[in-house]
Image (cartoon, helix red, strand yellow):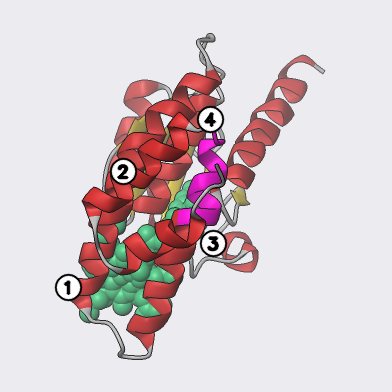
Amino acid sequence: MQADYSAMRQSILDGAPESAASLATQAVEQGLPPLEVIDHGFVPGMAEVGEQYAQHKLFLPDMLAAAEAMKAAMAVLEPELKRQGGERPPAGTVILGTTKGDIHEIGKILVGTLLTANGFKVHDLGVDVPSERFASTAKELNADVIGVSALLTTTMRGQRSVVEALDRAGLRSQVKIIVGGAPVTRKWAEEIGADGYAKDAITAVALVKGLLAERLALHHG
Ligand code: B12
């Protein structure tokens, strides 16, 4: 049987959590790679919802329903992703969160899931996180990397505040900061003095691995 990507996309557009979850379950039962199912089946639905919202064809409640459907699908696919990663000693500790004033969480959760699947210890602070909390938690957990998500052009500046908060806490040289989210660009990351930017969850894993390898090389080389 083939993956029904168009039905998955439609379940997001319809804001139908039951149908999204059952399509995800079917995909798992068929042995389809969970990441492909997310990327080709469900994420295109979210992108379409965003476009239709921008064109005033869909409204806030529709966006909310779509997010619920996406979360229902992810609840099925996440454990699969993590299981495929297997058990290994932690490759490093990463703190994740969405900036103050911003409640978008789906992309961040996906980044966290893939990092976990790749052996990282992930501590997710959730959404609407004050900059100082990123810094204090980094200190508390002796974190290697902080990942800051922002989905609104207005909350992107919160990413700069996290860089500044880490500076103030005297931790800037010890902890790497990476940023992401739909409106975020590499140029913005450079402008605010972050250590990296990734456009999606797969690239985020490569980015974190690269940053930590760089650091190991500095310490030992
Ligand atoms: C779902 C959604 C919502 C849901 C969120 C529910 C939830 N639990 O998360 C709800 C309904 C709550 C919502 C609310 C609002 N939303 Co909204 N929302 C979306 C939508 C449709 C999808 C976002 C999503 O989940 N995408 C799927 C994930 C998988 O993709 P992603 O988030 O981009 O994440 C990937 C990458 O960006 C990256 N990434 C993400 N984070 C990080 C972090 C790091 C460190 C790294 C390295 C990478 C990384 O990796 C991820 C995985 O590949 C987008 C449209 C869009 N195209 O983005 C609009 C959108 C982001 N929302 C928008 C708006 C305007 C709003 C509201 C202001 C609407 C209103 N009038 O109230 C509110 C704001 C609420 C708030 N204070 O935050 C606008 C933003 C416009 C702008 N440029 O600022 C968008 C673009 C829609 C549009 N086209 O107008 N929204």
Residue at image position (70%, 34%) is 210
Report, in whole angstroms, how far the alpha carbon at label 4 lies from the one at label 2: 14 Å
Residue at image position (63%, 46%) is 203
Q: Earlier in the sequence, mark 3 or mark 4?
A: 4
Q: Is mark 2 within 8 Å of ligand 1?
A: no
Say if residue 156 shows up in the picture: no
Q: Which of marks 2 and 1 is nearer the N terminus?
A: 2
Disc 2 packing (10 Å; few <14; some 14–19; many ≥20) = some
Q: SS class of the residue under badge 2?
A: helix
**Residues at marks 4 and 1 touching, judged by CB atoms closer than 8 Å:** no
First to last magenta residue range: 31-41
Check disc 1 and give the amino acid type: Pro
**Residues at marks 3 and 2 touching, judged by CB atoms closer than 8 Å:** no
List the residue tagged with mark 4.
Answer: 31
Q: Is residue 37 above or below residue 15?
A: above
Q: Provide residue 117's location: percent of width, then percent of height.
A: 51, 26
Q: Earlier in the sequence, mark 4 or mark 1?
A: 4
Report, in whole angstroms, how far the alpha carbon at label 3 lies from the one at label 2: 42 Å
Check disc 3 and give the amino acid type: Ile
Q: SS class of the residue under badge 4?
A: loop
Seen in the image, is 197 located left or right of residue 98? right
List the residue tagged with mark 2.
Answer: 22
Q: Provide residue 171's location: percent of width, then percent of height.
A: 46, 35
List the residue tagged with mark 3.
Answer: 192
Report, in whole angstroms, how far the alpha carbon at label 1 lies from the one at label 3: 34 Å
Report, in whole angstroms, how far the alpha carbon at label 2 lies from the one at label 1: 22 Å
Q: In which quarter of the image is the N terminus?
A: top right
Give the quadrant of ligand 1: bottom left
Mark nearest the camera among 3 and 4 is 4
